[in-house]
Amino acid sequence: MSATQPQVVDFELSPELAAFRSSVRDYANTHLGKAAEWDAEVKFPRSAVEAAAKLGLLRTTVSKAHGGSEMGNLASCIMLEEINAVCPSTGVTISVHNSLVNSLVGKWCSEEQKKRYFPKLVNGEWLGAYCLSEAFSGSDAAALRCEAKREGDHYVMNGAKLWITTGSEAKLFLVFARTGSDRVKGISAFLVEKDYPGVGVGKKERKLGLRGSPTNEIVLENVKVPAHNRIGDEGVGFTIALDTLDGGRLGIASQSLGIARACIELIRDCLGKQVDAKGRPTASQPDQWTLADLASELDAYRMLTWRAAILRDRGLRCGAEAAMAKSTASRLANRAARAAVAILGQEGASGATSAERWLRDARITEIYEGATDIQRLVIARSLLVP
Ligand SMILES: Cc1cc2nc3c(=O)[nH]c(=O)nc-3n(C[C@H](O)[C@H](O)[C@H](O)COP(=O)(O)OP(=O)(O)OC[C@H]3O[C@@H](n4cnc5c(N)ncnc54)[C@H](O)[C@@H]3O)c2cc1C
């Protein structure tokens, strides 16, 4: 290849992204040290989220024109791997705010809506939540029943959203509700403020993992939502929901990479201590193979994740690519966490190390923002119906 030919594939980060990664690593080491405590006490990592806001980590997907840093999806993925390698509860809070809420507002909201909400979202004064799931609508998101009925210059909203990340902390809810009877085209999206009369935070879920991240029911009882808070036209809500999830899945893929990396480091440190008098590794071959396989997969799935992020940053479709990244990285996180607990033995199971927390947190990466089976269906469909 001649020096003048454009380089198509470059595995090096730009100096700016490398410096950004290093600054986020510093943030994680400085502000996330209480991750185990937040997990044990089921406590929202408020100080960590506030520090992230001060450092501008809650505005990476927002344009400069709206007060963001316009760093994009690749930078957000790099950031989220670093944060999740220390505290996945903080990681999911920041992921939802950036990759679901801010991304949706930036891509789908009107200029007037952006001017109203971005000033509060970019500095973390308001956290956002993404409200799609309901009691009978998880994987089958189009089955949602929450209703928004037009009455003059507003909609009257009734229903309940379940399993909403940051539910008790958020001030702005992006709510998907039924405005018509058609399963898909009858869904619209709305900006709903927590302070609107009739909006209530319901039960808090008691979870296996990610226990520092509050997950709540959001109850909507005769809530008057101004018509100017509808996002886009009536009926495009489902398109908005799915498009936004493509970006969200990159956040969860990155969360999974962070968890996998932390587990691999635990295994490496444990096996690294097993040496003979000359300092040569004496760890069993099966344990070394496990370490080698996990490390190889980590590098491979990071490339898948960054590829999808680059496509999204270029404004291209990345549905199948994001599903590949999330489904592979989340399964790796689970395998790595199981291996860490197994190799560390009683220390791994006891809480003396963070292995058991990684195992509990990892399990959720295969459930939310589209369970693994659903990701595989998305990938298969892209191959069968190109
Ligand atoms: C910690 C946590 C936080 C969450 N945060 C949010 C949030 O902020 N906002 C939000 O809207 N939602 C949120 N959710 C909800 C989440 O998105 C749903 O749990 C997820 O979509 C799966 O839906 P479900 O739990 O109803 O499972 P189901 O849809 O009932 O699926 C159960 C199992 O059946 C499989 N399955 C279902 N349908 C099919 C099919 N057609 N083919 C093959 N297999 C299938 C699934 O893969 C899964 O293994 C959160 C969930 C969790 C656990």
Image (cartoon, rainbow, N blue to C red):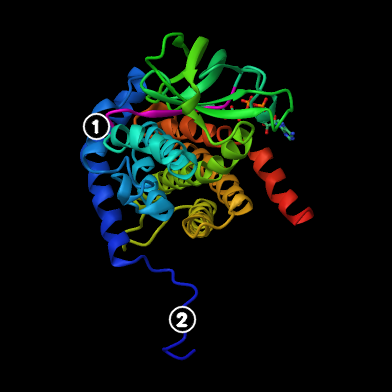
- Callout 2: CB less than 8 Å from ligand 1: no
Which is nearer the N-term, disc 1 or disc 2? 2
Q: Position of residue 88 (x, y in %)?
A: 40, 35
Outermost residue, bottom side: 2
Q: Position of residue 365 (x, y in %)?
A: 52, 36
Q: Quadrant of ligand 1?
A: top right
Image quadrant in which you'd find residue 50? top left
Instruction: Residue at 79% x, 54% y: name it.
Output: 384
Q: Which residue is mark 1?
A: 50
What main secondary structure does the magenta stretch of the protein show?
loop
Image quadrant in which you'd find residue 43? top left
Magenta stretch contains residue 4: no
Instruction: Residue at 44% x, 35% y: name it.
Output: 101
Please, what is the three-letter code of the amino acid marked with disc 1?
A: Glu
- Callout 1: CB less than 8 Å from ligand 1: no
Disc 2 crowd, CA 10 A, few/some/many (<14, 14-19, 20+): few
- Position of 330 compared to 42: left or right? right
In this view of the protein, which residue sits in the foreground, 23 or 200? Answer: 200
- Using the image, determine if residue 295 lies above or below residue 336: below
In this view of the protein, which residue sits in the foreground, 77 or 236? Answer: 236
Please, what is the three-letter code of the amino acid marked with disc 2?
A: Pro
Outermost residue, right side: 384
Q: Position of residue 102 (x, y in %)?
A: 41, 39
Magenta stretch contains residue 126: yes
- Position of 113 compared to 108: left or right? left
Report whether residue 18 is seen.
yes
- Using the image, determine if residue 120 lies above or below residue 1: above
Disc 1 crowd, CA 10 A, few/some/many (<14, 14-19, 20+): some
Q: Position of residue 182 (x, y in %)?
A: 74, 27
- Position of 53 compared to 333: left or right? left
Q: Over which residues does the magenta segment extend? A: 124-133
Q: Which residue is mark 2?
A: 6
